[in-house]
Image (cartoon, rainbow, N blue to C red):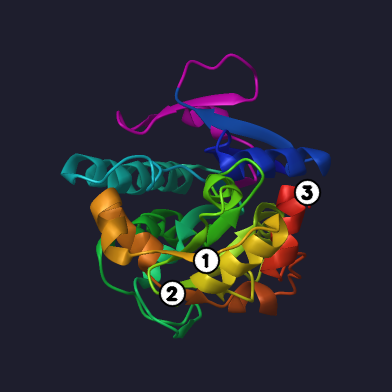
């Protein structure tokens, strides 16, 4: 297929582009800088411009863009950037695709588990209602921004991605130093659920969704066996052969991190119902095995 990707240089985009090329798909990339190669297509979401002439012949579009929620401490300006970088870019792309004479078959847009908000130990499928809070509201707007494409007859999938585990991302790499120093431990009471997914399964699932014509709408994209923070901590400790005796109190996280601490302390127990029913098989469904693979242990 001829596939266009926005956010191709990010954590998920880099892994996905590599796998798509291995499978001999033709990949073009949306970029904000002046194009320097034939596979680059210029766009500027802030200025609401996109080189629509270069979109002709594209069969599928994948949008992975958005400012990092962990990029910096949240204030009103950064929260606006988190929201606008997702909603505005998605709406621009969705409207551009809807206007194309020959429309792509599929539009896969990143979304997030933040849609569900804080939900304790409730099992969350795509049929579960929206939660409350900033991230839940942003995610709902983000998904709604794909409406022009779906109303134009394009198959849209909103991929609600869990916490991605990878060799190059923040998790679990950002946790290694305290564990190596013997200071590893759970966050808060450790009972909050962490819906995780191996980066390899993220890329495989996106490609599966490109091919699975029955998939549409919201798609939970996390391993079928979420774990609590305490369970994740113990698994990482076993992989590293280090103790995990400490607890980082919730109040300390809130002081150090501000409002974003609620993401680390919040609980979302996702189950990937729709993609599982469509026939997708997760390669990594055990968190300890996934961590061993990522850390090459």
Can you tell which mark lies on residue 245? 1
Q: Is residue 188 above or below residue 109?
A: below
Q: Name the residue nearer the viewer: 43 or 17.
A: 17
Q: Name the residue nearer the viewer: 121 or 280.
A: 121
Quadrant location of residue 130? bottom left
Q: Residue at x 76, y 54 (%)?
A: 293
Q: Are marks 1 and 3 in contact (CB under 8 Å)?
A: no
Instruction: Tell me if I can see residue 150 in this picture.
Output: yes
Residue 140 position within the rendered picture, expressed as x and y whole percent measured from the top left: 34, 63
Quadrant location of residue 197? bottom right
Residue topped by disc 2 = 192
User: Marks 2 and 1: which is nearer the front?
Assistant: 1
Q: Is residue 150 above or below residue 47?
A: below
Give the CA separation, mark 1 to mark 3: 24 Å
Q: Residue at x 34, y 71 (%)?
A: 117
Which residues are drawn in magenta?
33-61
Q: Is residue 119 above or below residue 104?
A: below
Residue topped by disc 3 = 296
Q: Secondary structure at mark 2?
A: loop
- Decide which of tag 2 and tag 1 comes sooner along the chain: 2
Give the CA separation, mark 2 to mark 3: 27 Å
Is residue 39 rendered magenta in the image?
A: yes
Q: Is residue 49 toward the left or the right of residue 180 in the image? A: left
Q: Residue at x 71, y 70 (%)?
A: 285
Instruction: Tell me if I can see residue 216 in this picture.
Output: no
Residue 274 position within the rendered picture, expressed as x and y whole percent measured from the top left: 60, 76
Packing grade of label 2 (10 A; few <14, some 14-19, many >=20) is many
């Amino acid at each position: 297929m001829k596939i266009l990707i926005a956010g191709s240089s990010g954590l998920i985009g880099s892994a996905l582009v590599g796998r798509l090329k291995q499978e001999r798909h033709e990949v073009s990339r949306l970029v904000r800088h002046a194009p320097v190669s034939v596979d680059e297509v210029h766009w500027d979401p802030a200025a609401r411009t996109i080189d629509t002439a270069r979109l002709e012949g594209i069969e599928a579009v994948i949008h992975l863009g958005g400012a990092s929620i962990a990029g910096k401490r949240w204030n009103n300006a950064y929260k606006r950037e988190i929201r606008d970088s997702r909603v505005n870019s998605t709406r621009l792309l969705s409207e551009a695709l809807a206007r194309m004479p020959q429309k792509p078959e599929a539009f896969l847009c990143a979304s997030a588990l933040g849609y569900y908000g804080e939900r304790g130990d409730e099992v969350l499928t795509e049929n579960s209602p929206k939660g409350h809070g900033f991230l839940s509201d942003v995610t709902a707007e983000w998904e709604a921004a794909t409406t022009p494409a779906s109303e134009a007859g394009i198959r849209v999938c909103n991929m609600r991605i869990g916490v991605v585990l990878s060799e190059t991302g923040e998790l679990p790499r950002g946790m290694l130093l305290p564990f190596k120093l013997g200071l590893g431990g759970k966050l808060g009471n450790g009972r909050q659920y962490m819906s995780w997914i191996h980066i390899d399964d993220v890329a495989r699932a996106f490609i599966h969704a490109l091919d699975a014509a029955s998939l549409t709408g919201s798609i939970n994209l996390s391993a079928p066996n979420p774990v609590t923070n305490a369970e994740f901590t113990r698994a990482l400790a076993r992989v590293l052969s280090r103790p995990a005796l400490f607890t980082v109190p919730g109040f300390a996280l809130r002081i150090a991190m501000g409002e974003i601490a609620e993401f680390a302390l919040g609980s979302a127990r996702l189950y990937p119902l729709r993609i599982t029913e469509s026939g997708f098989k997760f390669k990594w469904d055990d968190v300890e095995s996934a961590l061993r693979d990522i850390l090459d242990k």
